[in-house]
């Protein structure tokens, strides 16, 4: 079993992600990234009907931090949240202790976890 004591991470409950990409824009502006580079991207999965005629669809927006995510280290040193977390109006992104976040999301089925430190 991996000991994750004290490790920080970004948890994204993407079931309720609207695909608005505010996090993408906020991250790029905060870190002054070039047009073709991103700290986080939002992937669109679907739509497709899983069982034809069943009206059960795969259609998700999945935010994925990239290797250029620095965890907004400078903001956190000032006691602020990562800008993607702060700017998400759907409140699906959380930053904090990995163990605590994992415990709070035990009932969730659609979660992305990105370890920051
Ligand atoms: S934590 Fe900061 S650097 Fe990482 S994706 Fe969010 S805004 Fe971008
Ligand atoms: S994570 Fe939040 S800000 Fe980013 S696309 Fe989803 S709803 Fe929008």
Image: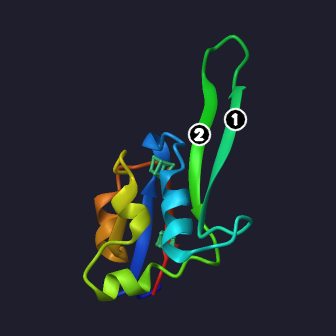
* Mark closest to the chain's N terminus, 2 or 1: 1
**Distance between mark 2 and mark 1 Cα atoms:** 7 Å
Q: Residue at x 69, y 26 (%)?
A: 50
Q: Name above or below for residue 55 compared with residue 117.
A: above
Q: Residue at x 49, y 57 (%)?
A: 23
Q: Residue at x 47, y 81 (%)?
A: 116
Q: Is residue 4 visible?
A: no
Q: Is residue 54 visible?
A: yes
Which disc, if any, is residue 71? none
Q: Residue at x 47, y 44 (%)?
A: 17
Which disc, if any, is residue 60? 2
- Where is residue 49 shown, x and y percent of the image? 70, 23
Quarter of the image where one finds residue 69: bottom right
Whether label 2 touches label 1, CB < 8 Å: yes
Q: Quadrant of the C terminus?
A: bottom left
Task: Name the side, left or right, on which 39 lies relative to 83.
Answer: right
Crowding at dot 1, Cα within 10 Å, few <14 / some 14-19 / many 20+, comes out as few
Quarter of the image where one finds residue 77: bottom left
- Where is residue 41 shown, x and y percent of the image? 62, 59
Task: Name the side, left or right, on which 52 lies relative to 58.
Answer: right
- Where is residue 47 shown, x and y percent of the image? 69, 30
Q: Name above or below for residue 22 compared with residue 81.
A: above
On the image, numbered disc 1 is attached to which residue?
46
Query: SS class of the residue under badge 1?
Result: strand
- Where is residue 36 shown, x and y percent of the image? 74, 65
């Amino acid at each position: 079993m991996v000991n994750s004591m004290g490790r920080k991470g970004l948890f994204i409950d993407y079931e309720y992600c609207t695909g608005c990409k505010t996090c993408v824009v906020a991250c790029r502006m905060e870190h002054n990234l070039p047009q073709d580079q991103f700290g986080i991207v939002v992937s669109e999965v679907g739509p497709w009907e899983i069982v034809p005629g069943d009206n059960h669809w795969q259609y998700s927006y999945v935010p994925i931090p990239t290797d250029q995510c620095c965890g907004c280290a400078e903001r956190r040193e000032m006691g602020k949240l990562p800008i993607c977390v702060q700017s998400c109006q759907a409140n699906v992104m959380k930053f904090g202790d990995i163990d605590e976040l994992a415990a709070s999301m035990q009932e969730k089925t659609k979660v992305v976890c990105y370890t920051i430190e």
